[in-house]
């Protein structure tokens, strides 16, 4: 039988066995899993995308928008 894959915890870097018996995978613990969820909730992670459209009435110029 092959040994389980070892991956680094995305939050702290600690080695984690990638096995079905680990309820927190890919994290090492409930604490690291919660820290990552909190970072998403606080909008610390961003997915790049196109720029948001300007609101109606704004000119978008560099002269202060008047």
Image (cartoon, grey):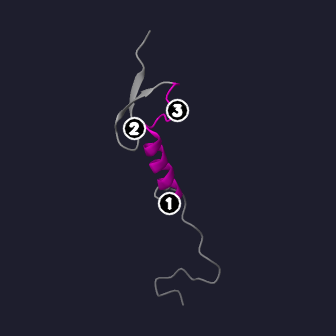
Q: Which of 55 and 17 is in front in this view?
A: 17
Q: Which is more foreground, mark 3 or mark 2?
A: 3
- Residue tagged 3: 23
Q: Where is residue 28 in the image (x, y as percent from the top left)?
A: 42, 36
Q: Position of residue 48 (x, y in %)?
A: 50, 55
- Residue tagged 1: 42
**Image quadrant where residue 13 sits:** top left
Circles 1 and 3: CB atoms closer than 8 Å: no
Q: How far apart are marks 1 and 2 (CA)?
A: 20 Å
Residue at the (47%, 41%) spot, across then down = 30
Q: Nearer the viewer, residue 42 or 53?
A: 42
Q: How far apart are marks 1 and 3 (CA)?
A: 24 Å
Quarter of the image with the N terminus in it = top left
Q: In this view, does 51 lie above or below 25?
A: below
- Residue tagged 2: 9
Q: How crowded is mark 3: few (under 14 residues within 10 Å), some or many (20 or more)?
A: few
Q: Which segment did they paint magenta?
A: 20-42
Residue at the (48%, 87%) spot, across then down = 64
Circles 3 and 2: CB atoms closer than 8 Å: no
Residue at the (57%, 83%) spot, across then down = 59
């Amino acid at each position: 039988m092959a040994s389980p894959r070892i991956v680094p915890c995305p939050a702290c870097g600690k080695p984690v066995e990638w096995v079905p018996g680990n309820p927190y995978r890919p994290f090492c613990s409930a604490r690291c899993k919660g820290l990552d969820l909190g970072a998403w909730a606080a909008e610390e992670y961003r997915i790049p995308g196109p720029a948001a459209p300007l609101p109606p009435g704004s000119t978008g110029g560099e002269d202060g928008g008047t």
